[in-house]
């Protein structure tokens, strides 16, 4: 069964917290799909992942790249799994595709954005009602992730 995780951003922005989680996923040999709600956001995150840290390299591309199937981390607005990802990150309230196609699905949401917070609550209720095992992580004041449920 798909492992479903909710990451509640309270101490940092998505751009600060996301790269470390993507790096860990790639280190584990997972192929990642990162789904945003719009092309502008996808493109902004694409640029950010090239520059977020000078000494780091996170191989990635977008669904508009020449070879999306070859990308270890694929940024998309589509429900498709063009790179054969086994972990899917959903950000900014992106609507998930069928989650059973993935080993892990991660919802990341801004705790100070009412729409994202309500969307995450709605997804939690829907997936919990569907019998999925869910975990909820919230940021501690120092930015570490703490398992709350």
Image: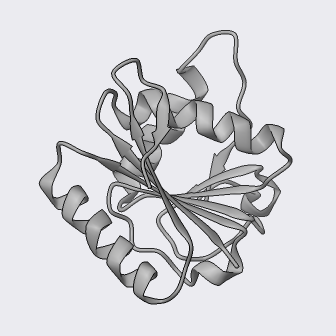
Res 28 → quadrant? top right
Closer to the camera in the image, 106 or 76: 106
In which quadrant of the rendered image does the C terminus lie? bottom left
Tell me residue 46's x, y (percent): 53, 40
Find the residue positioned furthest to the bottom.
130
**Residue shown at 47%/65% (left/top)?**
77
Q: Is residue 136 above or below residue 17?
A: below
- Residue 124 left/right relative to 117: right
**Residue shown at 28%/74% (left/top)?**
122
Tell me residue 135's x, y (percent): 51, 59
Q: In this view, does 67 lie above or below 145?
A: below
Res 115 → quadrant? bottom left
Tell me residue 60's x, y (percent): 69, 43
- Residue 137 left/right relative to 101: left
**Residue shown at 34%/32% (left/top)?**
13
Find the residue positioned furthest to the right.
29
- Residue 107 left/right relative to 51: left
- Residue 80 left/right relative to 124: right
Find the residue positioned furthest to the left.
114
In which quadrant of the rendered image does the N terminus lie? bottom right
Q: In this view, does 89 lie above or below 51?
A: below
Tell me residue 5's x, y (percent): 52, 58
């Amino acid at each position: 069964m798909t492992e479903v995780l909710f990451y509640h951003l309270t101490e940092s922005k998505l751009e600060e917290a996301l790269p470390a989680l993507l790096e860990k996923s790639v280190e584990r040999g997972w192929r990642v799909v990162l789904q945003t709600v719009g092309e502008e956001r996808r493109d902004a995150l694409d640029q950010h992942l090239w520059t977020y840290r000078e000494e780091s390299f996170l191989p990635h591309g977008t669904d508009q790249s020449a070879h999306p199937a070859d990308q270890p981390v694929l940024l998309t607005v589509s429900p498709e799994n063009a790179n054969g990802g086994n972990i899917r990150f959903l950000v900014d309230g992106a609507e998930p595709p069928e989650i059973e196609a993935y080993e892990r699905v991660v919802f990341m949401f801004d705790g100070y954005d009412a729409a994202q917070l309500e969307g995450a609550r709605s997804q939690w209720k829907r997936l919990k009602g569907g019998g999925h095992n869910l975990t909820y992580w919230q940021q501690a004041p120092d930015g570490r992730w703490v398992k709350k449920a």
